[in-house]
Amino acid sequence: MGGYPKTVYFTGPNEPVGKEVVLRGLRVEGTLPPEVRGSFFRAVPDPAHPPKFDTDHTLSGDGMISRVSFHGDGTADFAIRFVRTARYLAEQEAGRARFGKYRNPFTDDPDMAGVDRTVANTTPVWHAGRLLMAKEDGRPYRVDPLTLDTLGSYDFDGALKSGTMTAHVRIDAVTGELFFYGYEADGPASSKVAYGVVNADGALQSEQWFDAPYCAMMHDFTISENYALFPIYPTTSDLDRLKAGGEHWHHQPELDSWLGVMPRYGDVADIRWFKGPKGVHSYHMMNAWEDEAGMLHFDACLNNTNAFAFIREPSGIFLQPQEIQGALTRWTVDPRADGGTVVETIIGPPGDFPVIPARLQGRRYGHGWMLSMNPQLQGPPLFAGPVGVGFNMLLRLDGMDTATPRVTQALPLPPQAAYNEPVHVPAADPAYDGWLIMIVDQQVGDQLVHEAWVVDAGKIGAGPVARVVIPARLRPQVHGWWVPQAQLDALSA
Ligand SMILES: [Fe+2]
């Protein structure tokens, strides 16, 4: 068994770290807004052992839960720990990888059959006083938000039937309900999708299953005030390929994309399917909302192919970076119609990691933020993350509830620096737009420097109002979640 592969997914900023760290009393430089008191939780994939296959990539890394806690006294704490998944524990026991290719159980050591193989590495979801580390290939793991101890696999007190749950839940701020789905709900390459609604107290209220048009990577979805929207893009799986030891995902550009729409408290039998363009793909949606005429708008960071080379290339798709094109894209449908075709409008730049204020989830919204690439960058980007290149520009968009949203503000980074996904912290005064918090990675000489930045969400171009240097080597994060201190205090009370 050799070491880690010498590929972009395991070298440079993506080099595995795997250290559990607690750092207390970190100094906050600048002025921390009073609203920024609480914890920024982050999901960080980090493989504890060299993979069994050199074709492995960042999405397989063992989940680490990380927390940056902002206190009211000008200091911050940092902590990061592995999630004790069944897979992590089994591999720790052996001192080596026992699970094989990404989401292919047929490539695991035979004695691992039946062992939960999720790595819980994608999103720390906070709802009803529970912190769940979620990944779409399995059920989430519950983690103690104060100690970061792993409390075990979570199934809503035995109520969950689906074997999977998305890392991209949607919470309606008005009702407090959490909406989720799980695809490949009854096993690899299945087209069965579970759709669930969890009430504000955390109890699973309903779980219904439906069939997707084909087994697709369903990474994210959206809700609006009255509907649930399920996008289907042609990154597909196949059981025979898995059994033959192949890759979980191939991208199939010849297939149609689809948007499934149903009343969010309705019956899955009432899903209406609207056809989209062939071959497109999106990892993340900014929002969905209904206008006064009852039309439904679905705003996604859409690409002309799958953004990940480790999915394209086994599919036989070899593209130069400039051939991969994307844009913030709106699909508009009439949810009262009996299906049809989406009306597509380009409404923003290429990029990903869209963020909106939590209170506007599923509602008409005026603004949002996203990460993009700086076209004027005078030097190389940072080669980091699953795409291999880190985003180096933060954008604010306004007019999102019009036909012509526009980029109004930008915060570019210097060469060899990258943003991780921001979280939004609301302002106490609703007249203000709140704050964005994110980790910024920068190559300085042969060192990687990591800082947590707090940026005024209404004036991002002014740069950070506060920064915390984190004196530890950090691997790129996937998603994060902000939890106000009052909600954490309520737990210990
Ligand atoms: Fe995601």
Image (cartoon, rainbow, N blue to C red):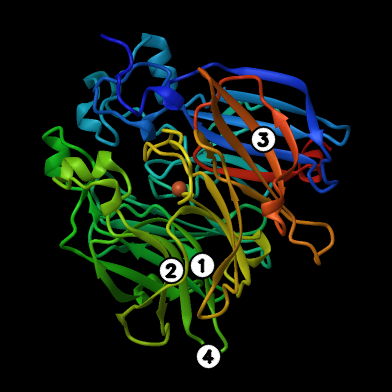
Identified at 68% across, 67% down, the residue is 174
Percent from the top left, x then y, of residue 477?
51, 35
Percent from the top left, x then y, of residue 19?
54, 16
Find numbered disc 1 in the image and state the secondary structure of the residue it sits on: strand
From the image, tell me which residue sits under label 1. Answer: 223
- Label 3 with label 1: CB-CB less than 8 Å: no
Residue sitting farthest toward the bottom: 293
Identified at 55% across, 39% down, the residue is 414
Kind of residue sitting beneath label 4: Ala
Kind of residue sitting beneath label 1: Ile
Q: Which mark is residue 372?
A: none
From the image, tell me which residue sits under label 4. Answer: 293
* Label 1 – label 2 distance at C-alpha: 6 Å
* Label 3 – label 1 distance at C-alpha: 30 Å
Viewer-side residue, 488 vs 287: 287
- Label 1 with label 2: CB-CB less than 8 Å: yes
Viewer-side residue, 294 vs 357: 357
Residue sitting farthest toward the right: 73
Q: Which mark is residue 229?
A: 2
From this view, report whether residue 99 is shown above or below residue 208. above
Q: Which mark is first along the chain, 4 or 3?
A: 4
